[in-house]
Image (spheres, rainbow, N blue to C red):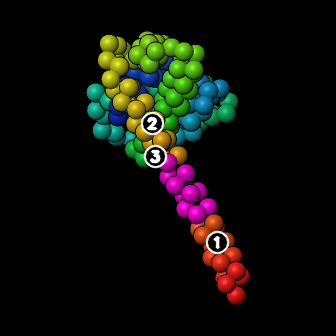
Amino acid sequence: MNVICHIQNEMHREYLNAILAFEDGAFSVFRDTDIGRFICSMTKYSDFPIEQNIDPEKAVKFRLPRTSAMPSLFTRWCYIATEDQRRINDFLIAKFDQDFIQYYFVGINLGMKQKDVISNFILARKLISKIGDVEQLKKRTYRLEEKNMKKMVNRLARRVQIQNKIISNSILEMSQYQFS
């Protein structure tokens, strides 16, 4: 049984090739993987066919597994609702980001050059449209590092404010006792 899901971002559509098997025009989904279990949980059932607007540029097919855990899967019409497609997109974005961040920082900690790490990630994850174009992932890395830096600066500034207030209050108290 195949269901249609619209994956909005081209890079994330290509990323599916790295995490799911593609065969006969559909990605095979298995319940023993996180994404497979999630896609299966987003599948809805109906007694009659559900009409869906399909954008051929963004549509991917998922082949659902034959499993006793979902007995009505092959006896009814299956589809993925629009809201559930957004959830699948969000899950895929989060999985991609987590995979990229982990791969990037491990590569950098091993002493590899940033460009080499990103190029290796592109090739290893079969991101065909990004071969030779590391700039988008480089920008993603830069934004992540900048965001983390701002977070650290804000935490440090907050800590300084709190400690300054404590010290100032202590000085004020001590000065009251000295002049009394």
| First reached walking from the N terminus: tag 3 or tag 2 | 2
Residue pointed to by mark 3: 150
Residue 19: give x, y in percent of width and height. 52, 21
Q: Amino acid at mark 1?
A: Ile
Determine the secondary structure under disc 3. helix
Q: Nearer the viewer, residue 46 or 28?
A: 28
Give the residues in magenta. 153-164
Whether residue 123 sits left or right of residue 166 in the image: it is left
| First reached walking from the N terminus: tag 1 or tag 2 | 2
Residue pointed to by mark 2: 144
- Alpha carbons under labels 1 and 2: distance apart: 40 Å
Magenta stretch: dominant secondary structure: helix
Residue 47: give x, y in percent of width and height. 48, 42
Please tell me in which quadrant of the rendered image residue 53 appears. top left
Query: Residue 155: within the magenta?
Result: yes
The residue drawn where x is 38% and y is 25% is 138
* Image position of 35 with respect to 19: above or below: below
Residue pointed to by mark 1: 171
